[in-house]
Image: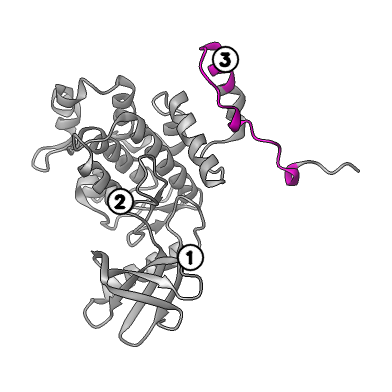
Amino acid sequence: ISTVYQIFADEVLGSGQFGIVYGGKHRKTGRDVAIKVIDKMRFPTKQESQLRNEVAILQNLHHPGIVNLECMFETPERVFVVMEKLHGDMLEMILSSEKSRLPERITKFMVTQILVALRNLHFKNIVHCDLKPENVLLASAEPFPQVKLCDFGFARIIGEKSFRRSVVGTPAYLAPEVLRSKGYNRSLDMWSVGVIVYVSLSGTFPFNEDEDINDQIQNAAFMYPPNPWREISGEAIDLINNLLQVKMRKRYSVDKSLSHPWLQDYQTWLDLREFETRIGERYITHESDDARWEIHAYTHNLVYPKHFIMAPNPDDMEEDP
């Protein structure tokens, strides 16, 4: 590995259940990377198998909203996993915000990206099983950053109808069916998205661990105390309520969440288009929505930015016979 990558031993990016993540550099190109180093002697087989699970899953995932696994090296004592380097995570962003919570506008921007990445996972029958703000990494320190899902150590491959029973994930973000060892499917991740939206907007967790979750959910005054929820839109609360559904079949899916009024918002669409234009890749919004938002802008006397009116891509044009 040292011939291809330089590892900076003094730059610790994080330490997880598997070992330590260091900053590094690809020698040939100078590209920054993150290198997870696992000491095989120190870690039990369970963690090693989790790591191998993560690598196996990430090797088949190529999406701008999912952390990119570059390669893996192995020696008799250690495993090195090389990934793209990112800048902090969503939890740090929430904690460092002025009220220790995020404005709705930024939350919508980030949650839409999380949902688009999840759509890709769920389409491939992969359930993340450990979604939380620490596992949502930011690609930059900008106020409206690109976000990428990481930490696939608990991820599982399951079918639409198939249910698994093994205990996975982090309790505060876990759906009731996992805590009760009932079966679960991809709707498990959707519960976690509900908790992420709640935590982002309020800076607090929705539930106490001591009390029955059903009692807590039914008590709106407990769930949404006036400080800070009186300042937060009813649409946000409605989406959270549709995600924090104890009955899995009632819980919103990715597509249902993306089409919810809270996220179907002109400002959010502009923020996402601005971002896609900046990075030169369109993977969050879809051109089939352009006309609708252009009409929305026109009928509400809003500005529709001209630079979003994309020229047709010559590759997409039909060849004339």
Tell me the mark number nearer the camera, choosing from 2 and 1.
2
Residue 320 % position (x, y): 88, 41
> Residue 282: which quarter of the image?
top right
Marks counted in the figure total 3
Dot 3 and dot 2 residues touching (CB under 8 Å): no
Label 1 sits on a secondary structure element that is: helix
Establish if 203 lies above or below 298.
Answer: below
- Please name the amino acid that badge 2 sits on: Asp
Q: CA distance from mark 3 to mark 2?
A: 37 Å
Residue holding disc 3: 298
Q: CA distance from mark 3 to mark 1?
A: 44 Å
Label 3 sits on a secondary structure element that is: helix
Q: CA distance from mark 2 to mark 1?
A: 22 Å
Residue holding disc 1: 59
- Please name the amino acid that badge 1 sits on: Gln
Residue 222 % position (x, y): 13, 27
Disc 2 packing (10 Å; few <14; some 14–19; many ≥20): many
* The magenta stretch spans residue 301: yes
* The magenta stretch spans residue 64: no
The single residue placed furthest to the left in the displayed view is 210
Q: Magenta span covers which residues? A: 294-316
Residue drawn at (37%, 35%) of the image: 249
Label 2 sits on a secondary structure element that is: loop
- Image quarter (top left, top right, bottom left or bottom right) of the N terminus: bottom left
- Image quarter (top left, top right, bottom left or bottom right) of the C terminus: top right
Residue drawn at (20%, 50%) of the image: 171
Q: Nearer the viewer, residue 313 or 248?
A: 313
Residue drawn at (59%, 17%) of the image: 295
Q: Nearer the viewer, residue 56 or 212?
A: 56
Mark 3 or mark 1, earlier in chain: 1
- Tell me if residue 251 can be seen: no
Mark 3 or mark 2, earlier in chain: 2
